Image: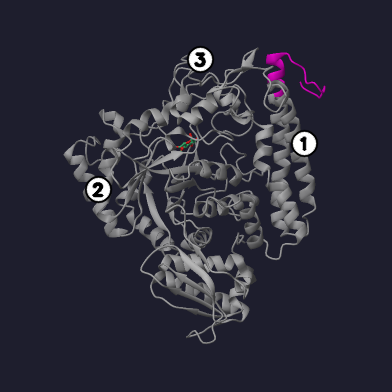
């Protein structure tokens, strides 16, 4: 059985037991009608032909738009949508509120999304890749879209689209940004597969985007170059794109990873990333499509001996100078931190320093570095910090999906909350992430006993901070096992070409990114930020080792030394996991037994892994520094 996630039929009880009127036509209004008809069939409500006796009225008041007004008129709850997508969004707002949506005292409210494009990126391959599997960094089974090299049954895709629509997502990129040969052909002779997915997502107001290979004209055997200055290449993209839009008239556009980790790009031809992105933008422009061009461009073959190269600088170094050079339909998609989805990073300065470029911030729902959905790690508190920091700088959000063909969708059932919340935060980044968690609990476990709610809050509210406690300390990052990135390996990346170092020696640890004595990375920030990070006196503790190399005896703002902080947090973090594990046993009988068992199994693994992290990190730093734990706890 597939778990209904945050749309169990029970969530529709308040609507389905009422007299409902839907006004409006078109595919999205049909979807709303269908949802309501199903709910009414289940809960005894009725679809009525006019306003006279209606208790819920959904209507389209304007020509387009995703927003809606919610209020009470003449004894009915009324949604007046700005356009067809707003009708669907209004429906799900009523679902979320349940009986509260029918309170006679309900005040008028206007809802509009803060970010225009709220996209989930799938790193799905059609084929099973020999190293990465079918879904790159996927921890939830296989792809929802392809199986055995062929498209899957679209029923599950439709359910997924429905879940996403209910969370506020309005775009999906369907395939991996590392575009291998088979997937390159989605652009040409496998277009019908894109079209079928687009039709399925369309009825839930979601546009499909396609990841394309920059060298597609060469890979597909049509041309000998992919040089963006070559007229034949430009013409190839125009005619190919014309055929794409014949098959999928509302394709959102292309997503491109270029000159990054072995993917081809404009650098091969001595061209800039603006040249590359603009060529694709020109081809997409007649159809209203956009290019999401990723700023994740860095040297992954650097010499670890070379202390002058700092990977954190890469996005800003490559792109800030191109500010203003991109066409209007290029969106630069920038990872939220300067490195790569670590548990704690500062904001990428590229997001703060490109005022004349359309920007989208990229988050990772799939927890590559945050427990891989084997650990409880509720990420919205991190995302909320990110989104508040980049407010006014970005107009879109793209997040790497954590969904797969697992019966619970996300491997760890509690990781569903991350998928739900990313859409909700993109709609309104000012929301309290813990309030969003409550919303998810209400929907997913309708009628959740107060007891269950308390257990879930105890497990999840601070799970990101707990994960941070027992893994890499103070913003240092990448102390993971190379390749699969799960579990501790303090020096695993230290002498590799990946640019991910911590520089621990017998005296201290951390990366000196200051202007005064380090790589100068801090100067990429606007002055107030730069000053804060540059100075040891003002650099926040949690980012200390991201910006500074300090002795183990350095005293943090918290009052303890760096080495004692490492010991204290690692003991505390693993201990908190024990408490979480015990607490979850109190939820037995309050949730579906299969879900309870899955979470139990994951918590057992989380405990094993947290203990391993604690012992390896503590032992490593004890052996390097020779400084004993002030409290004499076991270190090996
Ligand atoms: C899709 C990280 C991941 C890669 C991923 C890359 C990216 O490096 O480990 O698997 O590739 O980010 O975001 O492009």
x, y percentage for residue 466? 69, 38
Q: Could you tell me which secondary element the residue under label 1 belongs to?
A: helix
**Contact between labelled residues 3 and 2, with CB atoms less than 8 Å apart:** no
**Is 70 positioned to the left or the right of 212 in the image?**
right
Closer to the camera in the image, 485 or 478:
478
Quarter of the image where the C terminus is located: top right
x, y percentage for residue 507? 65, 12
The answer for how far apart the CA atoms under marks 1 and 3 are is: 38 Å
The residue carrying mark 3 is: 517
**Is 183 positioned to the left or the right of 463 in the image?**
left
Q: Residues within 10 Å of mark 1 (few under 14, many from 20)?
A: some
Residue 563 visible here: yes
The residue carrying mark 1 is: 575
What range of the chain is rendered magenta?
A: 618-636
Q: Is residue 621 magenta?
A: yes
Q: Could you tell me which secondary element the residue under label 3 belongs to?
A: loop
**Contact between labelled residues 1 and 2, with CB atoms less than 8 Å apart:** no
Residue 404 visible here: no
x, y percentage for residue 8? 61, 65
Q: Residue at x 73, y 59 (%)?
A: 591
Quarter of the image where the N terminus is located: bottom right
The residue carrying mark 2 is: 283
Quarter of the image where one finds residue 439: bottom right
**Is 549 positioned to the left or the right of 229 in the image?**
right
Q: Classify 252 as above or below 227.
A: below
Q: Residue at x 67, y 26 (%)?
A: 557
Q: Classify 621 as above or below 379.
A: above
Q: Classify 45 as above or below 321.
A: below
Tell me which numbered mark, 2 or 1, is placed earlier along the sequence: 2
Q: Residues within 10 Å of mark 2 (few under 14, many from 20)?
A: many
């Amino acid at each position: 059985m597939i778990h209904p996630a945050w749309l169990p039929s029970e969530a529709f009880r308040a609507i389905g037991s009422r007299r409902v009127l839907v006004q409006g036509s078109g595919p999205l209004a049909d979807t709303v009608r269908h949802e309501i008809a199903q709910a009414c069939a289940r809960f005894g409500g009725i679809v009525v032909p006019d306003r006279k006796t209606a208790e819920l009225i959904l209507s389209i008041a304007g020509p387009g738009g995703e927003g809606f007004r919610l209020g009470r008129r003449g004894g009915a709850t009324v949604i007046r949508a700005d356009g067809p997508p707003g009708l669907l969004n209004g429906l799900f707002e009523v679902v979320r509120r349940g009986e509260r949506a029918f309170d006679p005292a309900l005040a008028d409210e206007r809802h509009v999304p803060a970010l225009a494009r709220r996209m989930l990126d799938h790193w799905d391959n059609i084929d099973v890749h020999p190293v990465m599997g079918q879904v790159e960094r996927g921890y939830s089974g296989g792809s929802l879209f392809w199986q055995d090299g062929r498209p899957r049954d679209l029923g599950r895709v439709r359910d997924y689209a429905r879940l996403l629509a209910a969370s506020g997502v309005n775009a999906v990129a369907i395939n991996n940004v590392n575009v291998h040969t088979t997937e390159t052909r989605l652009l040409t002779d496998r277009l019908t597969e894109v079209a079928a997915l687009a039709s399925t997502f369309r009825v839930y107001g979601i546009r499909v985007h396609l990841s394309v290979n920059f060298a597609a004209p060469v890979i597909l055997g049509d041309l000998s170059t992919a040089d963006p200055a070559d007229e034949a290449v430009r013409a190839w993209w125009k005619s190919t794109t014309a055929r794409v839009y014949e098959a999928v008239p509302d394709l959102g556009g292309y997503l491109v990873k270029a000159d990054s980790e072995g993917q081809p790009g404009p650098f091969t031809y001595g061209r800039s990333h603006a040249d590359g992105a603009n060529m694709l933008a020109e081809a997409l422009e007649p159809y209203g499509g956009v290019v999401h061009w990723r700023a994740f461009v860095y040297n992954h073959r650097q010499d670890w001996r070379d202390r002058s190269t700092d990977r954190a600088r890469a996005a800003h170094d490559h792109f800030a100078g191109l500010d203003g050079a991109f066409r209007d339909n290029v969106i630069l998609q920038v990872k939220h931190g300067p490195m790569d989805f670590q548990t704690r990073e500062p904001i990428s300065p590229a997001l703060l320093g490109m005022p004349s470029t359309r920007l989208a911030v990229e988050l990772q729902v799939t927890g590559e570095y945050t427990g891989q959905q084997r650990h409880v790690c509720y990420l919205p508190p991190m995302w909320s910090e990110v989104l508040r920091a980049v407010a006014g700088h970005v107009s879109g959000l793209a997040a790497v999906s954590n969904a797969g063909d697992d019966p619970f969708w996300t491997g760890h059932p509690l990781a569903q909350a991350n998928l739900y919340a990313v859409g909700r935060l993109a709609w309104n980044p000012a929301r309290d992430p813990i309030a969003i968690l409550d919303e998810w609990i209400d929907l997913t476990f309708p009628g959740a006993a107060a007891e269950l709610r308390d257990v879930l809050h105890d497990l999840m509210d601070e799970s990101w901070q707990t994960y941070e406690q027992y893994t890499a300390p103070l913003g240092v990052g990448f102390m993971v096992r190379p390749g699969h990135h799960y579990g501790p390996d303090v020096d695993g990346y230290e002498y590799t070409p990946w640019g991910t170092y911590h520089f621990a020696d017998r005296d201290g640890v951390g990366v000196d990114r200051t202007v005064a004595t380090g790589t100068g990375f801090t100067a990429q920030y606007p002055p107030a930020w730069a000053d804060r990070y540059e100075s040891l006196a003002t650099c926040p503790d949690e980012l200390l080792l991201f910006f500074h190399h300090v002795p183990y005896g350095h005293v943090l703002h918290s009052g303890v030394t760096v080495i004692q902080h490492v010991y204290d947090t690692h003991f505390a973090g693993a201990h908190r996991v024990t408490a979480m594990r015990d607490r979850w046993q109190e939820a037995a009988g309050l949730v579906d037994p299969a879900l309870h068992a899955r979470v139990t199994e994951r918590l057992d693994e989380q405990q094993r892994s947290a203990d391993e992290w604690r012992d390896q990190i503590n032992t490593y730093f004890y052996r390097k520094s020779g400084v004993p734990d002030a409290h004499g706890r076991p270190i090996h």
